[in-house]
């Protein structure tokens, strides 16, 4: 049973607003808060549930609805992946309010990652250290630096595969926070890009991410040139991005491609995929597991150059493109035939043939 808001915590608001500032700061957030950690240690009060939060924070709630956090469990891609591999391990981040049990009830599924998932730890309500509101809060709260920096995001965006006990060494399933720490933007928090401030100075709760075309396109600068009769060079330079491009789980990649444009149509396309590439290896434990054999994504602060030999391009125009893609699963050994879940066009154009010498 979930803890519900009660008149007890509302009645204390003139006092607890002062107490909140004196409470000790919370530790770094490792994962979204499960149900058990949302219960107050003080028997006289109850931590408000997510619906109580929403009643008092309508603007943030409106931004959150339909966001990647709100749809984290019900989103079709995740549901398809969960059907193929029904691990409770995944539910800890995608439906944290489910108490991390075997099943996920309808309310936890609909809420996804909601208010208490990030703003409550060990019976304390957490608030940003950069809060701008001068209003007196109707409940106690703790100013937490974890919400301002990478610690609030790390638990769900940097973690190993769950089969680490079978591996010779752990392998990161996501390593976005590690990439950020090694990037030129290490001093810039995740929320600066993914929770930008609105006109009122408050952080947005729409959690803009990899499904936002403008954000994806802003991550890299791309240019393309012909370097021979049939050869094209496409350069991707990291721009406003504090981690590798693409980052996140292993099902994201960038397709760089080109094809000949003739009067009778287009020729055969050539493609290269920038991603974390995987293969199978037998571990010392005897288990055959997928391991990472290459990583040719665009590094934060760096660049990646792709040269493509385009058949029959001599004397003809060449169409080129760069696309950000979400792959549905890793079942296919042939990257070119992998099932896709969606894509965003990042850049593209036409290259004229080289003039006759």
Image (cartoon, rainbow, N blue to C red):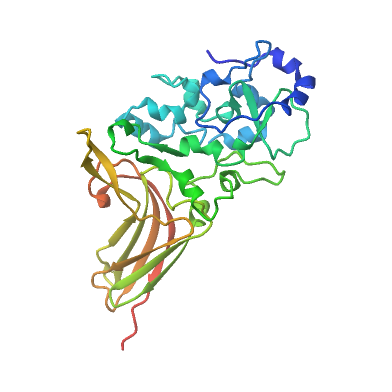
Q: Residue at x 66, y 45 (%)?
A: 197
Q: Position of residue 271 (x, y in %)?
A: 29, 60
Q: In this rendering, would 265 be left or right of 189?
A: left
| 136 relative position to 173: left or right | right
Residue 31, percent across and down? 50, 30
Q: Nearer the viewer, residue 45 or 272?
A: 45
> How far across and down, in percent of the image, does residue 268 sit?
24, 64
* Outermost residue to the top: 43
Position of 170 relative to 252 (above/below): above
Residue in view at x 49 percent, y 56 percent:
219
183 relative position to 138: left or right: left
What residue is at 71 percent from the left and 22 percent from the top? Answer: 139
Q: Relative to residue 290, is residue 145 drawn left or right?
A: right
Vertical order, 299 against 280 (above or below): below
Measuring from the top left, give residue 38's x and y in whole percent. Answer: 57, 20
Q: Which residue sits at x=58%, y=15%?
A: 3
Q: In the image as oriented, which residue stretches furthest toward the bottom?
A: 357
Q: Is residue 67 visible?
A: no
Quadrant that contains the C terminus: bottom left
How many numbered dots are placed on residues in this image?
Answer: 0
Which of the 4 image quadrants contains residue 119? top right
Q: Is residue 48 above or below residue 281?
A: above
Q: Is residue 58 visible?
A: yes
């Amino acid at each position: 049973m979930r803890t519900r808001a009660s008149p007890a915590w509302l009645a204390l608001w003139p006092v607890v607003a002062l107490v909140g500032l004196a409470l000790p700061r919370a530790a770094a957030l490792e994962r979204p808060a499960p149900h058990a950690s949302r219960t107050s240690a003080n028997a006289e009060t109850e931590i408000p549930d997510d619906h109580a939060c929403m009643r008092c924070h309508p603007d943030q709630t409106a931004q959150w609805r339909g966001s990647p956090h709100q749809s984290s469990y019900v989103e079709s891609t995740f549901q398809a992946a969960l059907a193929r591999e029904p691990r409770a391990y995944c539910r800890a981040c995608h439906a944290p309010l489910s108490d991390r049990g075997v099943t996920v009830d309808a309310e936890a599924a609909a809420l996804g990652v909601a208010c208490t998932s990030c703003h409550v730890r060990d019976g304390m309500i957490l608030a940003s250290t950069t809060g701008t509101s001068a209003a007196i809060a109707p409940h106690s709260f703790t100013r937490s630096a974890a919400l301002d920096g990478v610690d609030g995001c790390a638990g769900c965006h940097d973690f190993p595969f769950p089969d680490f006990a079978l591996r010779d060494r752990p392998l990161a399933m996501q390593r976005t926070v590690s990439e950020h720490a090694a990037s030129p933007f290490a001093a810039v928090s995740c929320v600066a890009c993914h929770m930008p401030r609105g006109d009122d100075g408050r952080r947005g709760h729409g959690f803009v991410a990899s499904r936002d075309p403008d954000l994806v396109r802003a991550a890299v600068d791309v240019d393309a040139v012909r370097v021979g009769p049939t050869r094209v060079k496409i350069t991707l330079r990291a721009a406003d991005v504090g981690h590798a491009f693409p980052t996140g789980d292993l099902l994201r990649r960038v397709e760089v491609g080109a094809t000949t444009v003739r009067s009778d149509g287009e020729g055969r396309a050539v493609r290269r995929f920038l991603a974390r590439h995987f293969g199978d290896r037998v571990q010392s434990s005897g288990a055959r597991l997928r391991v990472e054999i290459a990583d040719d994504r665009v590094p934060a602060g760096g660049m990646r150059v792709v040269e493509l030999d385009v058949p029959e391009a001599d004397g003809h125009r060449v169409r080129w493109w760069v696309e950000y893609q979400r792959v549905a699963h890793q079942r296919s050994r042939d990257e070119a035939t992998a099932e896709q879940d969606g894509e965003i066009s990042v850049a593209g154009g036409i290259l004229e043939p080289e003039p006759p010498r």
